Image: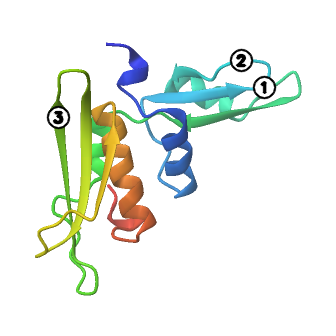
């Protein structure tokens, strides 16, 4: 399996950084203006480059989290808040023509799922779940390990 399928893609990585999730991953997306595409580097290399300028151009680096790293950030139980009790579910659906991960969110004690998102990989589904929980203030940074 390609490394790109085992870590968050660039956009969710940027979103998690905007939510101030600690940029502590084994892998990093590194972007440099002269490159056509961002590259995945081991964090030992990327950390040194992150604060360095190459030829006067800024280098950007974002954590490319693995599914295990994201899983450690998720709460053990769905967050329960009286005004917004939310449950979530992730599952893999194998079909004839495509395989997809589904992430569903719902208010507890209501049968219908009110939002379902699709993702091609488990890591992307987990990233979408974490971003959703942060965006809707269902969890806070202090609750993330």
Tell me the CA gap for discs 2 and 3.
34 Å
Mark sitting earlier along the chain (2/3): 2
* Among the 4 quarters of the image, the one containing residue 109: bottom left
- Give the vertical position of 129 relative to 82 (above or below): above
Determine whether, in the image, residue 90 is placed left or right of residue 125. left
- Give the vertical position of 17 relative to 119 (above or below): below
* Among the 4 quarters of the image, the one containing residue 10: top right
Point 11% across, 69% down: residue: 111
Q: Quadrant of the N terminus?
A: top left
Coloration mode: rainbow
Determine whether, in the image, residue 54 is placed left or right of residue 70. right
Point 13% across, 74% down: residue: 110
- Mark 3 element type: strand
> For mark 1, what is the residue?
33
Callout 3: few (<14), some (14-19), or many (20+) C-alpha neighbours within 10 Å?
Answer: few
Which of label 2 and label 1 is nearer to you? 2
Point 32% across, 55% down: residue: 145
Which of label 2 and label 3 is nearer to you? 3
> For mark 3, what is the residue?
93
Residue nearer the viewer, 144 or 45? 144
Residue 83 marker: none
Tell me the CA gap for discs 2 and 1.
8 Å
- Mark 1 element type: loop
Callout 1: few (<14), some (14-19), or many (20+) C-alpha neighbours within 10 Å?
Answer: few
Mark sitting earlier along the chain (1/3): 1
Q: Residue 112: x and y, percent?
A: 17, 66
> For mark 2, what is the residue?
36
- Mark 2 element type: loop
């Amino acid at each position: 399996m390609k490394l790109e399928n085992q870590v968050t893609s660039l956009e969710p990585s940027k979103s998690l950084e905007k939510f101030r999730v600690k940029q502590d991953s084994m892998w990093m997306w590194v972007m440099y203006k002269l490159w056509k595409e961002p590259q995945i580097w081991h964090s030992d290399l990327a950390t040194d480059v992150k604060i360095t300028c190459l030829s006067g151009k800024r280098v950007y680096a974002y954590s490319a989290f693995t599914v295990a790293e994201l899983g450690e950030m998720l709460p053990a139980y769905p967050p329960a808040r009286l005004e917004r009790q939310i449950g979530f579910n992730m599952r893999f659906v194998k079909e004839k023509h495509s395989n997809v991960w589904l992430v569903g969110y719902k208010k507890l004690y209501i049968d219908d799922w009110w939002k379902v998102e699709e993702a091609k990989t488990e890591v992307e589904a987990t990233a979408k779940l974490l971003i959703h929980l942060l965006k809707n203030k269902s969890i806070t940074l202090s609750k993330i390990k």
